């Protein structure tokens, strides 16, 4: 069932992502979040410029209800931050419809490689021109997080089982180092509703 | 992220939502710095292992080749990190130059951080390239040492063969002297009437001639057979 939903998800992204359309994308460079649980944390900035208690949502319907309820509030006082992690297709759809997000924000966030068909199956490359991204209301930053494993890896090719993140392994003096480097991405999106009223979202992969 | 938002937003301009992007930028820059430190320490370990040595006998050629291959992977990853940094700087509209102290605006401005990181990774890439050249030279030195050892072994084998040849020469010389003496002794030790001066001494010549002919013909036939087999 999860695989079927994943295939449908890829089908919807295909018009925006040529590597997926060609079916050439290497499995190790693009792994679905089949085991990660979606989580959306909402933080609201109060009048005294302090953030209130975070509210967490893991189900798409609960999130939809919450967002609809928020949209009824006075727009002049709305300052909200949403932190998104391990998103599923349903949650993505709720967010896309409510915030009117472009589809590219999801494809850019998930795509780790610029060109398909690489034998390495690993990331890199600059998939955009400066003029093409000028004026975008979001930025997607790809970075690399060093991690220490409890025991050294046994092979060069590793993926995180939960998040699908590629794990880069370093061999040093004939031994695999227990320090590995995980490929990660984070996206920041924002929009101003009215002067002094805005919404923004952090998304991590 | 929740911690930073709840603890460190007091000094930010909260009328603009993009001000909150600073936390993400700082986290990303911090991770790039940690990766840079890891890469530098890795390069240091390899360079340390190559230094302060009187000879390179502890390096096997397979180890040198493996290190060379690993350094190709490091170069590839460093190029990827540089690409990703440039992609970040393009999106954040950061100029690829070094900020002067007067241009820095405190912790809320990540521009100098990414400019510094870009130069740092450029330097790490240069050090990796130098290390690659060193390992290539090491592989050459180790290969030359192995070839020298093989030549030494060949020289020793040739010297041994030379000594054996000298021993054989001595034995041959002894044979040249003592074989005719032995022949004459056995000839004169034949009993009558077959010995020299006996009535039937004349039988010695046809018998020995026949035997000698059979041996010579057999030798040449075997030689011919060997040559024919070799030609095929």
Image (cartoon, coloured by chain):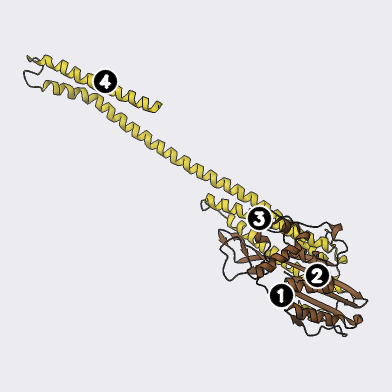
Chain colours: A brown, B yellow
Query: Which residue occupies the foreground of this view, B102 or A189?
Result: A189
Whether the residues at callouts 2 and 1 have beta carbons within 8 Å, the answer is no
Q: Is residue A14 left or right of residue B193?
A: right
Q: Earlier in the sequence, mark 2 or mark 1?
A: 1
Q: Quadrant of the N terminus of chain B?
A: bottom right
Q: Is residue B54 visible?
A: no
Marks 4/3: CA distance? 72 Å
Taking the spot 87% from the left edge, 61% from the top edge, the residue there is A134
Residue designated by label 3: A120
Residue for badge 4: B217
Dot 4: chain letter: B
Residue at which label 1 appears: A38
Q: CA distance from mark 2 to mark 4?
A: 100 Å
Image-quadrant location for residue A85: bottom right
Q: Separation of disc 3 and disc 1 at Cα?
A: 29 Å
* Discs 4, 3: same chain: no
Crowdedness near tag 4: few (<14), some (14–19) or many (≥20) residues, C-alpha within 10 Å: few
């Amino acid at each position: 069932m999860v695989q079927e939903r994943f295939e449908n998800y890829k089908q919807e992204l295909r018009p925006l992502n040529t590597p997926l359309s060609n079916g050439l994308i290497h499995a190790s460079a693009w792994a679905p979040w089949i085991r990660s649980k979606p989580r959306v944390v909402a933080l609201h900035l109060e009048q005294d410029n302090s953030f209130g208690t975070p509210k967490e949502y893991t189900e798409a319907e609960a999130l939809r209800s919450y967002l609809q309820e928020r949209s009824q509030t006075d727009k002049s006082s709305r300052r909200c931050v949403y932190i998104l992690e391990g998103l599923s297709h349903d949650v993505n759809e709720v967010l896309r419809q409510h915030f009117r997000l472009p589809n590219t924000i999801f494809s850019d966030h998930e795509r780790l490689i610029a060109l398909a068909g690489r034998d390495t199956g690993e990331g890199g490359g600059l998939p955009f021109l400066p003029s093409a991204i000028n004026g975008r209301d979001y930025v997607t930053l790809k970075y690399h997080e060093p991690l220490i494993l409890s025991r050294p890896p046994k092979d060069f090719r590793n993926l995180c089982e939960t998040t699908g993140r590629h794990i880069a392994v370093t061999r040093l003096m004939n031994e695999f180092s227990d320090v590995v480097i995980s490929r990660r991405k984070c996206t920041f999106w924002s929009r101003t509703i009215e002067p002094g009223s805005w919404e923004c979202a952090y998304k991590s992969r | 992220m929740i911690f930073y938002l709840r603890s460190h937003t007091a000094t930010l301009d909260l009328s603009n939502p993009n001000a909150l992007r600073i936390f993400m930028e700082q986290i990303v820059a911090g991770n790039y710095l940690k990766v840079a430190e890891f890469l530098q320490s890795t390069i240091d370990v390899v360079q340390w292992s190559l230094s302060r040595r009187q000879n390179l006998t502890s390096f096997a050629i397979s180890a040198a080749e493996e290190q060379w291959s690993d350094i190709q992977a490091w170069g590839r990853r460093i190029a990827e990190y540089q690409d990703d940094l440039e992609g970040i700087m393009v999106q954040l509209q950061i100029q690829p130059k070094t900020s002067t102290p007067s241009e820095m605006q405190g912790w809320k401005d990540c521009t100098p951080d990414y400019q510094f990181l870009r130069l740092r990774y450029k330097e790490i890439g240069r050090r990796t390239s130098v290390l690659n050249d060193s390992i290539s030279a090491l592989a050459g030195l180790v290969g030359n040492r192995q070839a020298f050892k093989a030549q030494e072994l060949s020289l020793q084998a040739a010297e041994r063969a030379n000594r054996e040849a000298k021993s054989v020469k001595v034995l041959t010389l002894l044979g040249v002297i003592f074989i005719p003496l032995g022949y004459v002794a056995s000839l004169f030790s034949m009993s009558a009437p077959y010995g020299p001066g006996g009535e039937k001494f004349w039988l010695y010549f046809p018998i020995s001639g026949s035997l000698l002919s059979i041996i010579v013909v057999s030798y040449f036939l075997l030689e011919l057979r060997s040559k024919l087999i070799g030609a095929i």
